Image: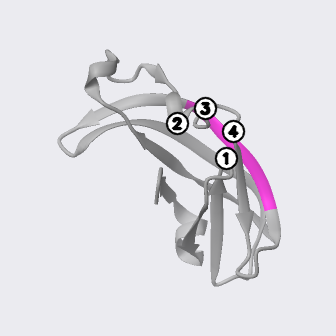
Amino acid sequence: MTFTMKGAFDLFVTSAQGLTQGAACQGSGSSSYARAGAPVKVFDGQGHLLAAGSLKNARYESNPIGTACVFDIAVDGVPDGYSSYSVEVADQGTQTVSSPQAHSWVFLHDGA
């Protein structure tokens, strides 16, 4: 059995960029890898590639905690049966998520 890993990836931005709530956005400068179409890879605990997808279009979000460019994630064909998964966005290092997180909603952060 497989499932679709769904979630979001956030990239901190400053409000000085002149973006408004909900506007399209992407990374720039050292974060230019954060763009629609950037690869999202899911690995098992031994580093074997299990499935791959990509970042979807992003929107600018501002709230009391901060401001971010938030990308949607959907990776199809992730196999069941692992206690945890490692997720990598655009070859920027992996973040480990538990199986329950992977099956419900994954929230990844830039630079974690």
Disc 3 target residue = 35
**Which element carries disc 4, helix, strand or loop?**
loop
Say if residue 27 shows up in the picture. no
Give the vertical position of 37 relative to 42 (above or below): above
Q: CA distance from mark 1 to mark 2?
A: 12 Å
Q: Give how far across and how far down residue 105 sits, in percent.
A: 52, 59
Colour approach in the figure: one colour
Work out whether mark 1 precedes mark 4 in sequence or the reverse, and give the earlier one: 4
The answer to whether marks 1 and 4 mark residues whose Cβ atoms lie closer than 8 Å is: yes
Disc 2 target residue = 30
Work out whether mark 1 precedes mark 3 in sequence or the reverse, and give the earlier one: 3
Q: Amino acid at mark 4?
A: Ala
**Which element carries disc 1, helix, strand or loop?**
loop
Q: Give how far across and how far down residue 60 sits, in percent.
A: 39, 28
In percent of the image, x 64 and y 31: which residue is there? 36
The quarter of the displayed image where residue 46 is located = bottom right
Q: Amino acid at mark 1?
A: Ala
Q: Is residue 111 left or right of residue 90?
A: left
Instruction: Give the residues in magenta.
Output: 51-57
Give the vertical position of 53 relative to 104 (above or below): above
**Observer-nearest of 38 and 82:** 38
The quarter of the displayed image where residue 32 is located = top right
Mark 3 neighbour class, 10 Å CA radius: few under 14, some 14 to 19, many 20 or more: many
Q: Which circle marks residue 38 in the picture?
A: 4
